[in-house]
Image (tube, rainbow, N blue to C red):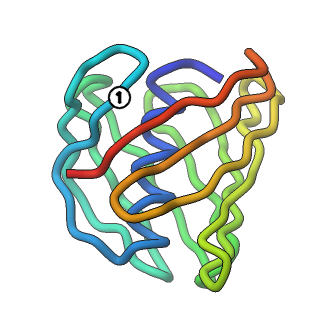
Amino acid sequence: MEVTTRVLVAYIAGRLLTGRASFAIQDHDRKRRLWMDGTVETAEVKVYSHERHGYVSGLGDGERFSLYQHSGEGHIVLLVNLPELRFEGCEHHSTFHFFGNVADPSVRLYDYQDCKWHRFTLG
């Protein structure tokens, strides 16, 4: 998936699984701190990415979320497993799957598109 989409997925999954309020995420691949605003709750997600100048929003049931990227990249399905602090899903624009885990405040995401692990830190 696109690098900016990967950051958004890591941010949303990290917030859902930790319950932590955060206005930024550190992308360790790019050595950049990226600012985000919005709401991440068990029933609704609405996040604004300052890097993309666009929103990602959607609804969920606490475990399964259907998210829409308003900047034109399409839908994301995100599944979270709170007891195991794990997540997985599919980004429909690229059609590639991803999975990862969270150890507050760190988020690790494996992207099948580039077959690599990516590391992020909420904060």
Give the total of numbered labels: 1
| Residue 30 location (% of width, % of height) | 36, 14
| Residue 97 location (% of width, % of height) | 80, 38
Q: Is residue 89 above or below residue 119?
A: below
The structure residue drawn at horizontal position 36% and vertical position 59%, both measured from the top left corner, is 46
Would residue 83 be found to the left or right of residue 57 on screen? Answer: right
The structure residue drawn at horizontal position 78% and vertical position 21%, both measured from the top left corner, is 115
Q: Is residue 106 above or below residue 39?
A: above
| Residue 83 location (% of width, % of height) | 64, 85
Would residue 7 be found to the left or right of residue 98 on screen? Answer: left
Dividing the image into 4 quarters, which one contains the N terminus? top right
Kind of residue indicated by mark 1: Asp
Between residues 120 and 113, which one lies in front from this camera angle? 120
Q: Which residue is mark 1?
A: 27
Q: Does dot 1 land on a helix, a strand or a loop?
A: strand
| Residue 74 location (% of width, % of height) | 63, 34
Q: Looking at the rendering, which quadrant does residue 54 occupy?
A: top left
Between residues 67 and 82, which one lies in front from this camera angle? 82
The structure residue drawn at horizontal position 26% and vertical position 23%, both measured from the top left corner, is 51
